[in-house]
Image (cartoon, helix red, strand yellow):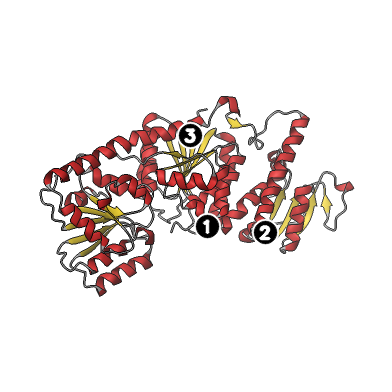
Amino acid sequence: MNSRLLLFMSEYVWGGAETQLRHLLQYYETNGYEVDVIIEHIGGFEDDKHLVQARSEMKYVHFFEFYEKGVGVERRQHNIDSFLKAHSRKVDYYAALLFYEADLVRVDIIRSYGIPVVYSERVDGTVVFKSERLIEYMKKCDSLTCNSSWAKQRIEEKIHRKVEVIHNGKCVKDISNKRRSRKIKNILVPSRLTVHKNQKFVLEWLQKAPAFDGTVVFAGKTDNKDYFRRLYGMVNSGNLKEHVKFYGHVENMDDLYEWSDLVILPSTREGTPNVILESFLVGRPAIVSDIGPEQEIVRDKRFRFGLEDAGNIQKCIEAVENLDDKSYYEMIDHNRELVINEYNIDRMASSFYRLLKSLDKPNAVIDGKSELLNWQKEMPAEPDDSALKRKSIISELLNHWLWLKQNDISISAYFHNRGYRTVAVYGLGILGERLLDEMQKFGIEVSYIIDRNADSRNSDIPIFKDIQEGMIVDAVVVTVAINYEKVFEQLHKLTAAPIIWIGDVIYSAELMSLDRSPF
């Protein structure tokens, strides 16, 4: 069986990160490399015609969609976790690639199935300043990447781990007709309408620029409706209707780039901005906010504006307009060569493939999986090895459980959110005892305990050696550390109630506490 990559995507089409992932998937498809893609539908775009087309055309890329509509966020996460458990048994995944910071909470779950994890930061590294929890998960990843030197420096300084820079990649396009006039009349602002893209800064400049007699087009999906209403309110109050147009999502941007004299990107934070790479490829000048990642692309400071005063945009526009023909065309040619040489699509895709495959090393694995992390697979082992493995797993689970408690996260939410009010507990070792304490504290009834050493146990809760047919429960929680799949097989023959492993409860509890909004 060929090994595969496991890739998590928030949506198939959304922002710049998804654009890069689609390039990567096309590279895998072209080269016959298999990949399983989990589409989480964080943005709610569940009727995506692009995804439908990709699914029908791709042979080596396999899509698995998980919807929130009708089931809720928590149930969707449970479905994804169940998918991971089932597919990790029958598919040899050589790595999992995460692009979305909220998915970092899956690191422990994914690695517990023996799958190395790579996290790729797609913005400017601010993830390391959001919470200590995310930092700890980044440290647990097998490899880290980002798309700018700026992000690399910030992450490495914070977590003291090596981070590899893999630049975004763009497909080479023919250059549009070069502008003969320096006069800026047609301005394109190509980005999703959301707060950190900072389109209001351009409107603030327009309010201060009564001499501007051209048109500004905002092209991008509305991610934040309240923000869009604020922008529209600024247009109305500033009498800017004749100068401003909102195009929404544009399927093919080529005509707009051709129309434009200048591209503006006023973001307060960015990764590597794909729209600037695209404008450079087609021969259009761009001015950008003077922030770290954009300094790497727009290297001439005359074409970067500070965000302290919207009037700075005017200074950059004048810098472009005042260029003589020779300087202007040299700038256009230089920008295009920069993208072709440093932001090549094949280089981006092959760099990811090389990095991901490097984690699949025969001298460090057993049956394609890390020996340390392969405790959920059935593998032959001496009794002493099994005892050590059991202790290691129990230690890891208890450590994570303690961390949850220190951060006021209770595993009882796992049961409450699923409507489980009564449970049976299989196994009364250390994990079983801790679970009983948690259930009693948070009002979840343990109807009975199943334990093979029933005669030697003392408990106020009934203890049996097997499932009790007359005692109906909402779920059965298995608390053994290893070989629990065999227990699952036995229990499924005796009850229709859901069978849950204690490790899934512990690792999934955190998903409920994380804000998964991309804004």
- For residue 356, above or below residue 444: above
Q: Earlier in the sequence, mark 3 or mark 2?
A: 3
Name the residue beneath numbered marker 1. Answer: 73
Q: Amino acid at mark 1?
A: Val
Rendered location of residue 188, percent (x, y): 23, 55
**Mark 1 residue element:** helix
Q: Nearer the viewer, residue 512 or 310?
A: 310
Circle 1 crowding by C-alpha within 10 Å: few under 14, some 14–19, many from 20: some
Q: Nearer the viewer, residue 286 or 228?
A: 286
Quarter-wise, where is residue 221 in the image? bottom left
Q: Amino acid at mark 3?
A: Leu
Between label 1 and label 3, give the one nearer the viewer.
Answer: 3
Distance, label 1 to label 3, CA atoms, is: 29 Å
Between label 3 and label 2, give the one nearer the viewer.
Answer: 3
**Can residue 502 be seen at all in this image of the molecule?**
no
Name the residue beneath numbered marker 3. Answer: 356
Rendered location of residue 452, percent (x, y): 82, 44
Quarter-wise, where is residue 413 in the image? bottom right
Q: Residue at x 51, y 51 (%)?
A: 128
**View extreme (top): residue:** 363
Q: Amino acid at mark 2?
A: Ser
Q: Quadrant of the C terminus?
A: bottom left
Name the residue beneath numbered marker 2. Answer: 412
Distance, label 3 to label 2, CA atoms, is: 36 Å
- The answer to whether the residue labelled 3 contacts the one labelled 2, judged by CB atoms less than 8 Å apart, is no
Q: Residue at x 72, y 44 (%)?
A: 395
**Mark 2 residue element:** helix
**Left or right: 450 with respect to 405?**
right
Circle 3 crowding by C-alpha within 10 Å: few under 14, some 14–19, many from 20: many
Q: Nearer the viewer, residue 384 or 322?
A: 322
